[in-house]
Image (cartoon, helix red, strand yellow):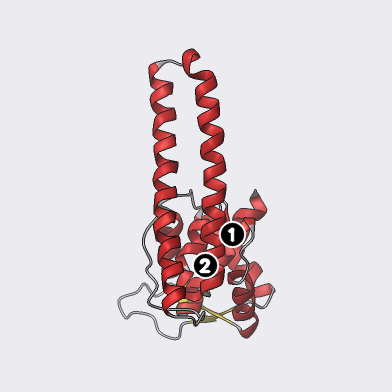
Amino acid sequence: MARSRSDVLETAILGLLNESPLHGYELRKRLNLMLGSFRAFSYGSLYPALKAMVAHGHIVGTESPTTPPHALSGKRARIVYQLTAEGKERLQTVLATSGPSAWEDESFDVRFAFFAQTDAETRLRILEGRRSRLTERLESVKESAARTRERLDEYTLELQRHGLEQVEREVRWLDGLITTERDRRRTRPSSGPENRHGQDNH
């Protein structure tokens, strides 16, 4: 689990830096927007991750030459992080994967956030894999609910119903995305990354 979280964080950092170099503070803000809505994100894990990525040669940090004139005199210069050639290669390798690690709860949202940088075939495989996983989960929860219904109080039943509705809603959302991807592939056979792809919030 810890390794999965660090992989997700690394992917998020690589994807954001691929869009533009960022100060650590700005990177932290953007990661919070991306990760904070659905997962607890520890700021304490960001800087060790950046340090490890610098050590692996995936990113490089350089001191920003300018500091605002109103800044305190003792303020340290900000570090700006950017991708190296190796980092871009690493990101492309990650974005080309479409196996179970891309469908799971830990990483799906981050992978989806970078669909504009992902080729059409990979996007479709990830969406179909996610839908398949959620459909399996839905069936399992429904079977469990049917077996235990008479033993649960009204509040637990309500919580169970809420959980089922959430999964059903995501399956419908995925159905729409899959249809869109398939239609797009039929009308435009090229499968390169498409910057026009929607970045719908999950």
Q: Nearer the viewer, residue 45 or 35?
A: 35
Percent x, y of residue 75: 43, 72
Percent x, y of residue 105: 54, 50
Q: For residue 105, say whether it is visible.
A: no
Which residue lies at the image location 68% right of the left edge and 73% below the top edge?
Answer: 55
Label total for image: 2
- Give the position of the C terminus as an image quadrant: bottom left
In screen coordinates, is 95 left or right of 158?
right
Which residue lies at the image location 54% right of the left edge and 20% below the top edge?
Answer: 147
Q: Is residue 42 above or below residue 157?
A: below
Q: Is residue 69 above or below residue 41?
A: below
Q: Residue furthest right?
A: 56
The residue labelled by disc 1 is 102
Percent x, y of residue 110: 50, 61
Give the numbered dot on residue 22: none
Percent x, y of residue 17: 50, 76
Q: Quadrant of residue 196?
A: bottom left
In screen coordinates, is 65 left or right of 9?
left
* Circle 1 residues within 10 Å: few <14, some 14–19, many ≥20: many
Determine whether the residue tagged by mark 1 lies in a helix, strand or loop.
helix
* Circle 2 residues within 10 Å: few <14, some 14–19, many ≥20: many
Determine whether the residue tagged by mark 2 lies in a helix, strand or loop.
helix
Mark 2 against mark 1, which lies toward the viewer? Answer: 2
What amino acid type should be assigned to the residue bearing mark 2? Arg
Q: Quadrant of residue 195?
A: bottom left
The residue labelled by disc 2 is 123
